[in-house]
Image (cartoon, grey):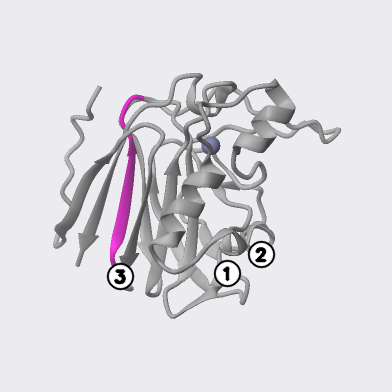
Amino acid sequence: MATQTDLSIPGATIREDVIVPAREPWSIKMRQGEILRIIDLEGQQAVDFLCYNADDPSDRYNAANTIKLNGNIYLGKDFGIWSVRARKLMTFIEDTCGSHDTLYGCCSVEIDDVRFGKNNDGRGCQGNFEAELAKHGMGAKDIAANINLFMYVPVEANGDVAIAPGVSKAGDYVDLLAEMDVLAVLSNCPEALNNAAGMKPTPIRVIVYAL
Ligand SMILES: [Zn+2]
């Protein structure tokens, strides 16, 4: 279960180290140069992720700009997370998983009701984001199409697209370097009706390193 990986980063100190329980959101303001490590403790756990310019939250993660400037619909090591104003918010400086989604957005009570005729006991990443953003004076209007860390969404040549079983293993992680002061917001996905979280949502660990 928990990773045995060496958690230290040379020259860095840990200023935050928390377990985010299954189905829960979390957020943190980060200074330029800090590193956010997100660890998929048990594997196959989607982590819905949003990022904002801390000084101007309207300049937030933009999926289309990120796809264009990386030249790829998937995210991984050395790829940037780009904003509406084409500023680099964060960079993937490490990635042991290799596949992160930009297309599929987040789950919600409403879309689960449409797709499955039921939902996850009233929980969804949309509601998680709204609750977490409220702590920062923000709300539903501030939610854009998000990154899905550790979620595998293959796209076929004919355009067919669907969630496939996750490829992340227990202990896989990403390190995201803040390229400027940012607000990072995540939802540890509560979805148990498809493969987003391996049909069984599990906890993650998040660590913030200050250099
Ligand atoms: Zn979700």
Determine which residue is flagged by label 3.
33
Q: Evaluate whether residue 120 shows in this view.
A: yes
Quadrant containing the C terminus is: bottom left
What kind of residue is marked 3? Gly
The residue located at (16%, 61%) in the rendering is 12
Of pointers 2 and 1, the one earlier in the residue sequence: 2
Closest to the observer: 174 or 57?
57
The residue located at (61%, 63%) in the rendering is 141
Image position, residue 75 (x, y; %): 55, 48
The stretch in magenta equals: 33-42
**Secondary structure beneath label 1:** loop
Image position, residue 93 (x, y; %): 38, 55
Please identify the residue farthest to the right as the structure is shown: 158
The residue located at (57%, 64%) in the rendering is 142
Residues at circles 2 and 1 in contact by the CB criterion of under 8 Å: yes
Quick one: label 1, few (<14), some, or many (20+) residues within 10 Å?
Answer: many
> As drawn, is 12 to the left or to the right of 149?
left
Per the model, the C-alpha gap separating discs 3 and 1 is 17 Å
Up-down: is 206 above or below 110? below
Q: Residue 65, which numbered label?
A: 2
What kind of residue is marked 2? Asn
Q: Evaluate whether residue 162 shows in this view.
A: no
Up-down: is 94 above or below 89? above
Determine which residue is flagged by label 1.
83
Image position, residue 87 (x, y; %): 54, 75
